[in-house]
């Protein structure tokens, strides 16, 4: 493994690291439900593409106690207005944004005018860090994944996981409070903890989560990734393939850094395809299915995503979520070009 990682690191050394439909979650029809607090609902639900914004809008509109948002790119005025409306009706709304994104700076100013408490994440410019998190907590539900709330983000192919699991909600709430405190000048970093929620900076929990899931795969490792440059992850994909795992990777063709990873993987026999991205859109997902373990979130599979930026990922073994993603992956794979 060490020799393999070293060889791949050399080949990748020139690569850089990363920048209203009806709501239908991608779950089997028998599991699909409506409403934010549904009796008997699935504990998690996988959502994709533009339907994510129907979910987000509904959760904000129906919240009674709290709405917490941490968003890298916040550029949708409709959602900013809905956050203001929630604050006006007595919901405790707080928002954290990244100062490096122009649209987020403008939205922060608009939130101020609407009386919504907001703070700016203090990124480490020396490390070229960003707060890349995409998180919504509304009462007893949370949404975490890869989808920004940008003006044109609804054009992108992306995923989020809606969760009602109390332990996951608790950890996500603690991460938000950690970041709120840091943005207020009172750092209180959380200690690492095993579980379904992982963060990067502080800690390297996402790398550990991703690599554990990949190393544990015995049948399949299917991934859709916006930017893939991390030598360790590429090496583990190759190693899984050599151990008989069905490894398949779909990448965004407009990310030039992906060319290096594609070349390394294909030379090792790992099938890689380019997603047919429409003009003005992205394959923005960061998601993988490793046998029955689904891992997704904000972190690209890059050195920055797994070690420098502030990121949040989630994993689930929920069979409905896994089956939903498997179905969509197979469809995407069949539509993509080698």
Image (cartoon, rainbow, N blue to C red):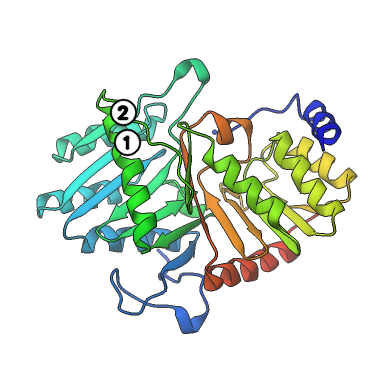
> Quick check: 268 left or right of 50?
right
Q: Nearer the viewer, residue 171 or 308?
A: 171
Q: Position of residue 133 (x, y in %)?
A: 43, 41
The residue depicted at 23 percent of the width and 32 percent of the height is 109
Disc 1 secondary structure class: helix
From this view, report whether residue 98 is shown above or below residue 236. Answer: above
Is residue 192 visible to us here?
A: yes
Q: Position of residue 106 (x, y in %)?
A: 30, 32
The residue depicted at 72 percent of the width and 62 percent of the height is 333
Number of numbered markers: 2
Image quadrant where one finds the N terminus: top right
Mark 2: few/some/many CA within 10 Å (<14, 14-19, 20+):
some
From this view, report whether residue 211 is shown above or below residue 45. Answer: above
Q: Are marks 2 and 1 in contact (CB under 8 Å)?
A: yes
The residue depicted at 74 percent of the width and 66 percent of the height is 334
> Quick check: 68 left or right of 277?
left
Q: Nearer the viewer, residue 194 or 13?
A: 194
Residue underneath mark 2: 182
């Amino acid at each position: 493994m060490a020799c393999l990682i070293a060889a791949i690191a050399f080949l990748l050394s020139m690569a850089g690291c990363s920048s209203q439909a009806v709501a239908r979650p991608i779950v089997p029809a028998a599991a699909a439900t409506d409403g934010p607090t549904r009796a008997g609902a699935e504990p998690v639900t996988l959502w994709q593409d533009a339907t994510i914004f129907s979910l987000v809008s509904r959760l904000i509109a129906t919240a009674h106690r709290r709405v917490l948002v941490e968003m890298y790119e916040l550029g949708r005025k409709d959602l900013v207005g809905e956050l203001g409306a929630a604050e006006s009706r007595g919901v405790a709304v707080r928002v954290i944004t990244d100062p490096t994104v122009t649209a987020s700076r403008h939205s922060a100013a608009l939130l101020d005018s609407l009386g919504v408490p907001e703070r700016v994440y203090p990124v480490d410019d020396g490390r070229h860090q960003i707060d890349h998190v995409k998180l919504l907590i509304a009462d007893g539900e949370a949404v975490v994944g890869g989808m920004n709330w940008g003006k044109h983000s609804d054009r992108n192919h992306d995923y989020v996981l809606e969760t009602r699991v109390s332990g996951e909600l608790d950890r996500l709430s603690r991460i938000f409070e950690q970041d709120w405190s840091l943005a207020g000048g009172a750092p209180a970093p959380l200690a690492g903890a095993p579980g379904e929620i992982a963060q990067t900076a502080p800690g390297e929990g996402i790398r550990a989560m991703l690599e554990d899931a990949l190393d544990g795969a015995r049948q399949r490792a299917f991934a859709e990734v916006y930017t893939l440059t991390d030598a360790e992850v590429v090496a583990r994909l190759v190693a899984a393939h050599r151990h008989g795992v069905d490894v398949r990777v779909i990448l965004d063709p407009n990310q030039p850094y992906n060319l290096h990873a594609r070349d390394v993987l294909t030379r090792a026999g790992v099938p890689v395809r380019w997603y047919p991205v429409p003009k003005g859109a992205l394959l923005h997902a960061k998601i993988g299915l490793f046998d029955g373990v689904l891992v997704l979130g904000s972190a690209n599979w890059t050195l920055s995503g797994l070690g420098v930026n502030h990121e949040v990922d989630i994993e689930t073994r929920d069979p409905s979520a896994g089956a939903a993603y498997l179905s969509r992956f197979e469809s995407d794979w069949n539509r993509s070009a080698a």
